[in-house]
């Protein structure tokens, strides 16, 4: 009997850890609501938690996909990349 394993073996990658430019004080915060059920409520909770913590964010930038089954379009991603210093994306399965 031949048993095939459908998962790939891990591969080593080279890179470096992201280095922040300092604390996120007064930086803009973006959210991508990915269309999953209740993710808007979850990310609203994350936003409230981040805003009540140390530092302050500018008005959050929020983009919403019409459906979880459709990728974010170029305009949504461009808006987040140009207007937000940090982006929080919805949940996966």
Image: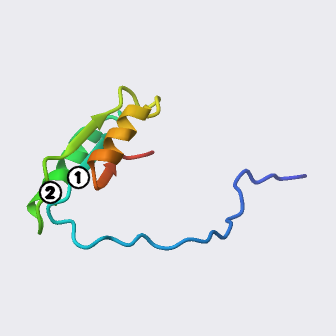
48 left or right of 38?
A: left
Q: Residue at x 66, y 70 (%)?
A: 12
Residue plotted at (21% across, 53% down)? 28
Q: Residue furthest top?
A: 66
Whole-percent x, y for residue 74 in the image = 43, 34
Residue 29's tag is 1
Q: Residue at x 14, y 57 (%)?
A: 57
Name the disc covering residue 52, or none: none
Q: Which image quadrant is residue 68 in?
A: top left
Above or below — where is 5 with respect to 44? below
Would residue 12 appear left or right of 26 to someone viewing this image? right
Which corner quadrant holds the C terminus? top left
Circle nearer the N terminus (2, 1): 1
Q: Taking 74 as reference, is 88 above or below it?
A: below
Q: Residue 80: x percent and y percent?
A: 32, 44
Q: Is residue 90 visible?
A: no
Q: Could you say where residue 59 lies in the image, as x and y percent from the top left? A: 13, 47
Residue 65 seen by the camera: yes
Residue 75's x, y, as percent? Answer: 38, 32
Judge whether 57 appears above or below 41 on screen. Answer: below
Q: Residue at x 39, y 27 (%)?
A: 67
* Residue on which disc 2 sits: 57
**Tag 1, which secondary structure?**
strand
The local crowd at label 2, few if under 14, some if 14 to 19, many if 20 or more residues have their Cα within 10 Å, is some
Q: Residues within 10 Å of mark 1 (few under 14, many from 20)?
A: many
Distance of mark 2 from mark 1, alpha carbons? 6 Å
Looking at the image, is 79 positioned above or below residue 27?
A: above
Quadrant position of residue 19? bottom left
Q: Looking at the image, what colour scheme do you see?
A: rainbow
């Amino acid at each position: 009997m031949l048993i095939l394993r459908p998962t790939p073996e891990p591969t080593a990658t080279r890179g470096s850890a992201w280095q922040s430019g300092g604390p996120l004080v007064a930086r803009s915060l973006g959210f991508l609501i990915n269309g999953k059920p209740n993710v808007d409520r979850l990310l609203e909770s994350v936003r409230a938690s981040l805003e009540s913590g140390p530092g302050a964010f500018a008005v959050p930038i929020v983009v919403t996909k019409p459906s979880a089954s459709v990728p974010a379009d170029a305009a949504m991603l461009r808006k987040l990349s140009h207007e937000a210093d940090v982006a929080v994306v919805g949940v996966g399965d």
